[in-house]
Image: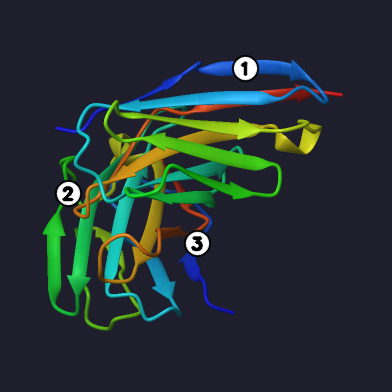
Amino acid sequence: KQEVTQIPAALSVPEGENLVLNCSFTDSAIYNLQWFRQDPGKGLTSLLLIQSSQREQTSGRLNASLDKSSGRSTLYIAASQPGDSATYLCAVNDDYKLSFGAGTTVTVRA
Amino acid sequence: EADIYQTPRYLVIGTGKKITLECSQTMGHDKMYWYQQDPGMELHLIHYSYGVNSTEKGDLSSESTVSRIRTEHFPLTLESARPSHTSQYLCASRPSGTGGVGYTFGSGTRLTVV
């Protein structure tokens, strides 16, 4: 059974600081890994999708890395802004379903 | 614009009522999913479908049922709502095939049973 862990559970940083969010998973037999953003009481917005054969993926200020053999992914957010405040979810796809971590709740202070 | 739609966004209903949560997608995706999320907790898969007339239960036991009569529509029904059903329900879809395209989620339905 795939288990996904996200560390830290919560993070508070001043505006402009870089964010580093960690995700680990127990079963390396994955097809891809997806990072999502969730605002309070809302649905999930997809941020980045990394295929199992890729090492990293970038979109604007966001960069995600994947080390499948060690079961780890990291999401980097450069030059954080108050609008980046949200919960960030890591999800691993084994082609049957997405297995989610509990998320990292980020607060960016102006 | 291709998207996935859930209605209603919020629902407060009395115990014992029958309810249906709607989910529709315009992307022609074969695979559709229902996830349940309690406040501050992880998402858990409760139902999925790989195409028309295909439905399966997920990992988390749920008293709800689903149907898939049309590709674009995947409604979830609770025959008799109870306070323990209070939660957020998220619908998702993706195309068949591995890797490639990720999951797309709807905005969710926040259900409160009183």
| Quarter the C terminus of chain B occupies | top left
Residue at the image position 70 percent from the left and 42 percent from the top = A61
Q: Nearer the viewer, mark 1 or mark 2?
A: 1
Q: Please report the residue visible at 38 percent of the width from the left and 59 percent of the height from the top.
A: B92
Residue of label 2: B58
Count of numbered circles in the view: 3
Q: Is residue A19 left or right of residue B19?
A: right
The residue tagged with tag 2: helix, strand or loop? loop
* Amino acid type at mark 1: Leu
User: What is the quadrant of the N terminus of chain B in the image?
Assistant: bottom right
Q: Which mark is residue A11?
A: 1
- Pointer 3 indicates a residue of which chain? B
Viewer-side residue, B20 vs B26? B26
How much space separates mark 1 and mark 2, taking CA atoms? 32 Å
Q: Chain of mark 1?
A: A
- Residue position marked by numbered label 3 in the rendering: B8
Disc 1 versus disc 3: distance between alpha carbons? 32 Å
Seen at 22% across and 81% down, the residue is B69
- Residue B70 in which image quadrant: bottom left
Dot placed on the residue nearer the N-terminal end, 3 or 2: 3
- At label 2, the amino acid type is Gly
Q: Chain of mark 2?
A: B
